[in-house]
């Protein structure tokens, strides 16, 4: 989760360009979301195994709702005083953070999880394949023609469902492959996805590549292995607590970081700051808002536990 959050933060950062390192993440870093969803699907299975359905949903609510509302109210406050970058005009969507496709998608995935869990236990890997095919076919449904914002976001929901389901499948029936095999196959698939992604950009998106996210399903185990090596590297340089903080609080950081980035990058108050100062200021504000959210969330959940 921590590695995925680093990739996503590098993808969205608007301060540095024309650099091979950041340009790589601008093009491919958003695939860190695949790691989020894969690990989320994996964790959901273990939660379903040890909890009743009522407890399962209660855990999902207390994990998601307080953070969404707290950060949503922060965004509303800043929106009301003129800091309106990355804010949605619909107040309800803004306060709940439902204007962010990931939140909308993960809520739907949570609702579907108990059904998917039972189906995957009985049907096995063929269910993953079927969902990949359905996901691919859903890309031809004209969601974007709807006047309703949330319906337009369904293309994200259907497009990223296979990786969430694959995470659930691996938790139910672990892959019996050697690490070397996972790395080789995953690397080949990942490179293929990179080429397809680069090709679509080179022709200015005229070449539609609707199956890239589906292909990424089969590269994600390799990315998880890669993240384990990155964890060792962080541990070697005594930076593991940073990675663990990013992973543990990835939801809160995800919710706030784009708004902070865009406000600092575009607001006239910060116009005279150089890129490095803006980047450091953004990281400081993200950390501040994340800590505030964590404290408030713990307080709310403590009160709810007493009810």
Image (cartoon, rainbow, N blue to C red):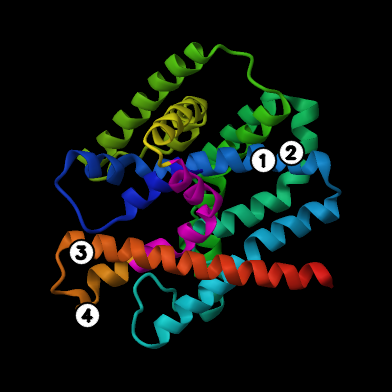
Residue corresponding to mark 4:
269
- The x and y percentages for residue 295 are 58, 69
SS class of the residue under badge 2? helix
Q: Which of marks 3 and 1 is in front?
A: 3
Residue corresponding to mark 2:
46
Q: Which of marks 2 and 3 is in front?
A: 3
Looking at the rendering, in which quadrant would you find the C terminus?
bottom right
Q: Report the front residue among 297 and 239.
A: 239
> Extreme bottom residue here?
81
Tag 2 near tag 1, CB within 8 Å: yes
Of callouts 3 and 1, the N-terminal one = 1
Tell me if mark 3 has few (under 14), some (14-19) or many (20+) residues whose alpha carbon lies within 10 angstroms of its own: some
Label 2 – label 4 distance at C-alpha? 47 Å
Residue corresponding to mark 3:
277
- Can I make out residue 148 in this image? no
Which residues are the magenta region?
Answer: 240-260
Q: Report the front residue among 12 and 196.
A: 12
Question: Does the stretch in magenta take in 241?
Answer: yes
Label 2 – label 3 distance at C-alpha? 43 Å
Residue corresponding to mark 1:
43
Total number of numbered discs in the rendering: 4
Label 1 – label 4 distance at C-alpha? 42 Å
| Residue 246 horizontal side relative to residue 26, left or right | right
Of callouts 2 and 4, the N-terminal one = 2
- The x and y percentages for residue 93 are 54, 73
């Amino acid at each position: 989760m921590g590695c995925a959050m680093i990739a996503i933060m590098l993808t969205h950062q608007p301060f540095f360009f024309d650099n091979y390192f950041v340009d790589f993440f601008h093009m491919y870093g958003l695939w860190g979301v695949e790691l989020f969803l894969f690990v989320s699907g994996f964790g959901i299975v273990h939660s379903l195994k040890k909890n009743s359905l009522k407890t399962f949903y209660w855990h999902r609510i207390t994990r998601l709702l307080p953070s969404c509302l707290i950060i949503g109210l922060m965004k509303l406050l800043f929106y009301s005083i003129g800091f309106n970058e990355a804010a949605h005009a619909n107040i309800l969507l803004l306060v709940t953070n439902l204007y962010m496709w990931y939140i909308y998608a993960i809520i739907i995935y949570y609702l579907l999880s108990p059904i998917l869990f039972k189906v995957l236990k009985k049907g096995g890997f063929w269910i993953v394949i079927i969902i990949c095919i359905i996901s691919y076919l859903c890309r031809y449904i004209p969601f974007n023609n709807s006047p309703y914002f949330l319906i337009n976001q369904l293309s994200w929901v259907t497009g990223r469902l296979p990786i969430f389901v694959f995470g659930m499948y691996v938790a139910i029936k672990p892959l019996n492959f050697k690490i070397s095999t996972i790395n080789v196959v995953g690397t080949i698939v990942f490179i293929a996805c990179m080429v397809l992604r680069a090709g679509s950009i080179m022709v200015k998106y005229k070449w539609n590549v609707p199956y890239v996210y589906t292909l990424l399903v089969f590269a994600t185990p390799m990315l998880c292995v890669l993240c384990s090596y990155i964890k060792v590297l962080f541990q070697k340089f005594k930076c593991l607590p940073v990675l663990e903080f990013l992973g543990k609080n990835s939801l809160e950081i995800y919710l706030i970081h784009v708004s902070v980035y865009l406000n600092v990058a575009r607001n006239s108050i910060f116009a005279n700051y150089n890129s490095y100062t803006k980047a450091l200021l953004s990281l400081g504000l993200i950390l501040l808002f994340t800590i505030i959210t964590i404290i408030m969330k713990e307080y709310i959940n403590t009160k709810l536990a007493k009810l």
